[in-house]
Image (cartoon, grey):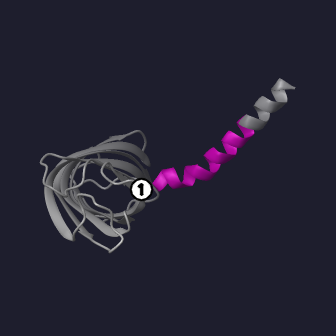
Amino acid sequence: MKQIKINKILSKLLLIGALVSPLTSYADYNNGSFYIDGAAGLGFTYDLPTGATTIAANAGYAFNRGLALEAGWTGLPSTQFGKMFNYNIYDIAVKGSIPFTNYFSLYGKLGTGVGYSTWSVTPAASNSAYWSSGSATTWIGLVGVGANFRLSNHLGIFVQNNSYIPFTSQAGSYGATNASMVGLEVSF
């Protein structure tokens, strides 16, 4: 009985391998290439009670399979305390990758940038630090991790988690933010 289960598992693994094999035979990273990516997901900010839809876009240059430099934007629009909050992060980061195969790699990001928050008040707003409309800017650090699956020489999908940590504190600026996203990368 155990032998039958093991055979079924092995046959399924062989089938998956046969289906994935054509993808892996032509997938390869371009060295010295520009890339752009877009992602969406969910983000949480320490100072706010609920999560926010998160969207991001990056443009970068991959020097080789292991090292890239990128500039990006991440936006977290949400409604909190009966008010509209927007948090926009503009960053620059060094991205280091560990390729396990020609089509799969893990990566980490380390960078810095600016977090710009805005909020608008409604009559039902509670008495809080954000009671009136306004904005704040803070200097942030970026630490991120992710995984990239190359579909071809020019196309990949990825999952990533970025943490944005404020270095300075200004009245009204948001606290540490965590953003988990899924996206698509195109290289040229």
42 and 49: which one is in front?
A: 49
Q: Which residue is most to the bottom?
A: 123
Where residue 26 appears, as percent x and y from the top left, is 46, 55
Instruction: Give left or right: position of 132 versus 53.
Output: left
- Number of callouts: 1
Instruction: Give left or right: position of 10 versus 122.
Output: right
Q: Is the residue 56 above or below the residue 176 in the image?
A: below
For the C terminus, the quadrant is bottom left
Q: Which residues are magenta?
A: 10-27
Where residue 34 appears, as percent x and y from the top left, is 24, 62
Residue beneath the point at 39% across and 44% down? 105
Q: Is residue 99 visible?
A: yes
Instruction: Give left or right: position of 27 versus 34.
Output: right
Magenta-drawn stretch contains 17: yes
Where residue 124 appears, as percent x and y from the top left, is 36, 71
Q: Is residue 183 visible?
A: no
Q: Quadrant of residue 84?
A: bottom left
Residue beneath the point at 37% across and 52% down? 44
Q: Is the residue 95 above or below the residue 78 in the image?
A: above
Name the residue carrying label 1.
Answer: 50
Q: Quadrant of residue 126?
A: bottom left
Residue beneath the point at 32% across and 48% down? 46
Q: Quadrant of residue 36?
A: bottom left
For numbered disc 1, what is the local secondary structure? loop
131 and 1: which one is in front?
A: 131
Q: Are there few (<14), some (14-19), or many (20+) residues within 10 Å of tag 1?
A: few
Residue beneath the point at 34% across and 54% down? 48
Q: Main secondary structure of the magenta part?
A: helix
